[in-house]
Image (tube, grey):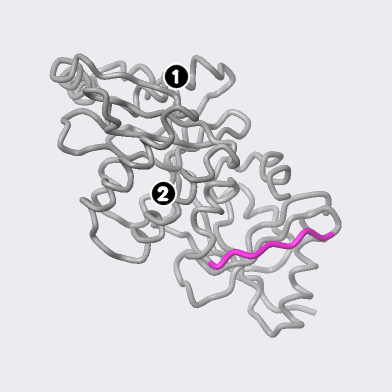
Amino acid sequence: MIKSFLYNQTYRTCDFTIGGIYMWVSYFKYEYAIYKDTLFIKGVSEDNLSKVAFSLPLGALSLADSLEVLHTYCKYHHLPFLLSAVPEAMLEQIPLPHVSKPLEDWFDYVYDIEDLAELKGKKYSKKRNHVNSFRASYPDYSYERIDESNLSDVLDFYQEFCRLNEKGGAIFNQELSMTCDILKHYFYMGFVGACMRVEGKVVAFTMGEIIEDVLYVHIEKADRNLNGLYEMINMSFSKDMKETYPSLAYINREEDAGDPGLRKAKESYHPVMLLNKYNVLINDYD
C-alpha cells in the first residue's frame, strides 16, 4: 500500500524506503495513514524516542496542504508539531515558521556506484589489497544472487552470525530480529540480494532495494574471521548491480547511528555525498 508513494520520491535518503521503514517499524513506532492519496507516517524522533514525530508526507496533496493536515491532527491531540529526518533540500520548502536542528548521527552516506564496483585509484588501494588477499586465500569462493535455492542457507548463516556476535543494545537487537524477519519474507519484500560461499558454505550476504538511480544497501553481514570478505561482497554486489541495472548512479549505505567504528568504516569508502537530515519543529500558529 505504501510502496508506490515511496518509489515516486527523489529524496535519496533511506528513511523513505521499504527497508528503512519496515526494519525499524517497532523501534521508531511507525504508523501510517493514507488520506487524499497522500501517505502520512507517524513515529518518534530519531534522536529522542520519547517525542512523537512525523515524516514529510508523500503523495497527491501539496506540501503546504499535507502539513496543514498534520497541524490539525497535532492540535486535536495536543501534540507538538515535529517533523523528523527531513532532507536538507526540503527545509526551504516548508511553508510554515519553524526551527530546524540537524540529526548529526543520522545522515546517510552515499557513494558513486562505479567507485565501489571498481575500487580504482590510490584512495582504494587498501580495499583492493583486502580483496586480493581474500581471493588468494579462498580461491574456491563463489558469489550468488539470493534466490529460492539458497535462501535457507543464508538464514542459517545469519542465525549463527547472531549467536556469535551478540552484543546487546536496543538498536542491535532490533536489527537482529528484523533482519531475520526480512529474510523469511525476502521475496515478498521485493529486495535484491546476494551471498558468498567458501568451501560451499554461506559466509556472507547483503541485500537492499532500488529506487530511481539509487541502490539502498539495508543489510550486509559477513564472517569476520575471513580477511577481506566484507570488502569482497561489497565490491561484488556493487559490480553486479551496476551491470544489471545500468541506470544506477549511487549507493546509499545508510547512517552510522553515532557508532564510531561504523562511522570509520563508512568514511573509508569515500562517500561522494552526505545526506543531512533535520528535525523540524513547526512553531505554533493559528
Q: Name the residue under label 2.
A: 255
- Judge whether residue 158 is colored magenta: no
- Graded by Cα atoms within 10 Å as few (under 14), some (14 to 19) or many (20 or more), the crowding at tag 2 reads many
Identity of the residue drawn at 78% across and 49% down: 59
Q: Which of marks 2 and 1 is nearer the N terminus?
A: 1
The location of residue 139, given as percent across then percent down, is: 19, 14
Which dot marks residue 149?
A: none
- Of the pair 284 and 268, the residue shown nearer to us: 268
Q: Give the side of residue 244 with respect to residue 69, left or right.
A: left
The location of residue 19, given as percent across then percent down, is: 53, 47
Q: Mark 1 points at which residue?
A: 240
Q: Tell which tag, 2 or 1, sits nearer the viewer.
A: 1
Is 277 situated above or below 228? below
- Judge whether residue 34 is colored magenta: yes
Q: Quadrant of residue 253?
A: top left
Identity of the residue drawn at 49% across and 19% down: 242
Q: Residue furthest right?
A: 36
Q: What element carries label 2?
A: loop
Q: Give the side of residue 27 with respect to residue 140, left or right.
A: right
Identity of the residue drawn at 25% across and 44% down: 264
Q: Which amino acid does label 1 sit on?
A: Asp
Question: How much space separates mark 2 and mark 1, taking CA atoms?
Answer: 23 Å
- Of the pair 118 and 89, the residue shown nearer to us: 118
Q: What element carries label 1?
A: helix
Q: What residue type is labelled 2?
A: Glu
Where the C terminus falls, by quadrant?
bottom right
- Of the pair 191 and 109, the residue shown nearer to us: 191
- Of the pair 272 and 59, the residue shown nearer to us: 59
- Our reading of the magenta stretch's main secondary structure is strand
Q: Disc 2, disc 1: CB below 8 Å?
A: no
Identity of the residue drawn at 29% across and 25% down: 197
Q: What stretch is highlighted in magenta?
A: 29-35
